[in-house]
Image (cartoon, grey):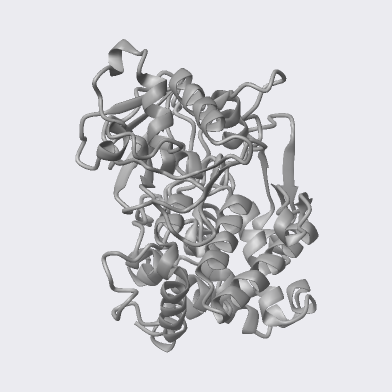
């Protein structure tokens, strides 16, 4: 399906209706911030939702980006990251591309799984992103690389592509929820035949929710007449992102929209970004009675299968070989497993702290080390300053780990996502100069000792992109 084929029939009817309601009170809305229960957000219209935009983001020192909360601050951050990404791609600079993409993931709170994937594929990353960008501009998801089973397209990568592609929005769980809610309301208000709305049944990406949440966020406006399916990562995700782009551009092209506040914001990129921001705010938590209310998670047992939608396991990739695995942040340890429910392997906080301490001592004063996670190299004492050696020393006095070959490929990948390890500038994953980033938030306590749990908690506080 191409753009002209999509923008027909009921989709056009919806475009007409939405364009006429950008500043009406049709989408007056309010919700309570789940992290700050006494903070209530309210808007009077779609345009007002843009004016009330807020997203607390950290700074990006290497790009000169300060932290902030409001729309202007976030736009400055996005424009800086966009400029960096585009220049990196122009120069085919893989490391620069990787670093800029990681900055985007940190800004959006979608580090998990994405940073390790970007790092594992750094050597060919610039070309990969350019190929996907060209395909997205072509708009045909039936062709490579968009049709490839290996295409990575999710709530993290949509943010990267929104910066390097033309007229391309971020399509995450909040934006999708808002679009679906608008379609459901359109159907109710106009009496449109639900069977005619197939192209408007926006698929909904999964969003992160605490397993113990007392009031899970409502992001599925499905009802007895109209249902919105779950969105899978990959090609299907790219297809719905493209449809959302086409639809919202058509809304902004509509004569009614040209009289709205969005039309006064500058060029199309600025208008589209503002409309996306409005949807992001509207979709945080849909109105009670117009969306399915998820069951409270208090006391619910976590899914034991990493592949389940409600699983607490996070996807990750080993750095040197890009092997996929899953990890779960438990109370006092990091648990890992392989696809297909492999035998779990855990890294207690105490062992991780001991490993980092050993790594610092082995590589003082500059903290530079090599991965050296080959069991053979460690056993032969070939890699004396490596992560593998530091971990082996850490578990040597642990009875439960006695005789176990070092399993630092997974640990290294997790520590990259946590911002504790910085990969080599030359792209050499296994034998390059890795850096131990002792100034990672919370990593060192007041006594200068490693505290991986405090680091994890600081990291988790920034991972609420959905």
Q: What residue appears at the point 45 percent right and 58 percent down from the top-left corner?
A: 118
Q: Which residue is more in the foreground, 344 or 209?
A: 344
Q: Compared to 300, does 172 lie above or below?
A: below
Q: What residue appears at the point 58 percent right and 23 percent down from the top-left corner?
A: 451
Q: Position of residue 75 (x, y in %)?
A: 73, 63
Q: Compared to 89, does 281 lie above or below?
A: above
Is residue 200 visible in the rendered image? The answer is no
Badge count? 0
Image side of residue 196 versus residue 80, left or right: left
Placement of the N terminus among the 4 image quadrants:
bottom left
Q: Position of residue 151 (x, y in %)?
A: 34, 66
Within the image, what quadrant is residue 196 found in? Answer: bottom left
Q: Position of residue 351 (x, y in %)?
A: 44, 21
Within the image, what quadrant is residue 374 found in? Answer: top left
Q: Compared to 178, does 37 lie above or below?
A: above
Q: Which residue is more in the foreground, 72 or 182?
A: 72
Q: Which residue is more in the foreground, 373 or 326?
A: 373
Identity of the residue furthest to the bottom in this view: 4
Is residue 283 visible in the rendered image? The answer is yes
Q: Position of residue 331 (x, y in %)?
A: 46, 19
Q: What residue appears at the point 63 percent right and 53 percent down from the top-left corner?
A: 107
Image side of residue 227 versus residue 75, left or right: left
């Amino acid at each position: 399906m191409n753009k002209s084929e999509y923008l027909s029939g009921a989709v056009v009817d919806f475009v007409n209706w939405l364009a006429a309601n950008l500043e009406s009170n049709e989408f007056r809305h309010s919700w309570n911030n789940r992290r700050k229960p006494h903070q209530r957000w309210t808007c009077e219209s779609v345009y007002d939702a843009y004016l009330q935009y807020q997203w607390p983001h950290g700074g990006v020192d290497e790009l000169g980006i300060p932290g902030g909360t409001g729309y202007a601050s976030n736009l400055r951050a996005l424009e800086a990251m966009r400029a960096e990404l585009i220049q990196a791609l122009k120069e085919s600079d893989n490391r620069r591309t990787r670093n800029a993409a990681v900055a985007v993931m940190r800004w959006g709170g979608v580090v998990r799984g994405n940073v390790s994937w970007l790092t594992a594929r750094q050597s060919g990353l610039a070309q990969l992103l350019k190929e996907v960008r060209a395909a997205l501009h072509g708009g045909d998801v039936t062709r490579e690389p968009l049709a490839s089973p290996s295409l990575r397209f999710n709530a993290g990568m949509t943010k990267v592509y929104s910066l390097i592609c033309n007229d391309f929005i971020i399509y995450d769980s909040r934006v999708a929820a808002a679009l679906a809610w608008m379609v459901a309301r359109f159907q109710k208000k106009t009496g449109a035949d639900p069977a005619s709305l197939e192209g408007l049944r926006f698929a909904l990406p999964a969003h992160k929710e605490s397993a113990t949440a007392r009031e899970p966020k409502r992001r599925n406006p499905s009802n007895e007449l109209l249902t919105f399916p779950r969105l899978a990562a990959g090609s299907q995700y790219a297809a719905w992102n493209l449809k959302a782009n086409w639809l919202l551009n058509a809304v902004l092209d509509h004569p009614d929209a040209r009289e709205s506040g969005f039309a006064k914001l500058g060029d199309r990129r600025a208008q589209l970004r503002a409309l996306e921001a409005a949807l992001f705010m509207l979709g945080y938590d849909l109105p009670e009675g117009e969306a399915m209310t998820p069951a409270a998670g208090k006391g619910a047992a976590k899914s034991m299968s990493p592949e389940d939608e409600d699983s607490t396991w996070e996807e990750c990739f080993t750095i040197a070989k890009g092997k996929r695995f899953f990890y779960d942040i438990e109370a006092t340890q990091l648990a890992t497993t392989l696809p297909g429910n492999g035998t779990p392997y855990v890294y207690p906080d105490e062992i991780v702290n001991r490993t980092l301490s050993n790594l610092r001592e082995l590589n003082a004063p500059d903290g530079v080390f090599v991965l050296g996670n080959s069991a053979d190299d460690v056993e032969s004492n070939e890699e004396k300053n490596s992560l593998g050696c530091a971990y082996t020393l850490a578990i040597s006095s642990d009875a439960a780990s006695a005789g176990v070959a070092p399993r630092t490929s997974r640990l290294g990948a997790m520590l990259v996502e946590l911002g504790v390890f910085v990969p080599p500038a030359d792209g050499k994953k296994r034998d390059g100069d890795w850096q131990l980033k002792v100034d990672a938030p919370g990593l060192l306590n007041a006594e200068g000792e490693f505290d991986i749990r405090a680091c994890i908690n600081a990291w988790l506080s920034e991972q609420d992109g959905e």
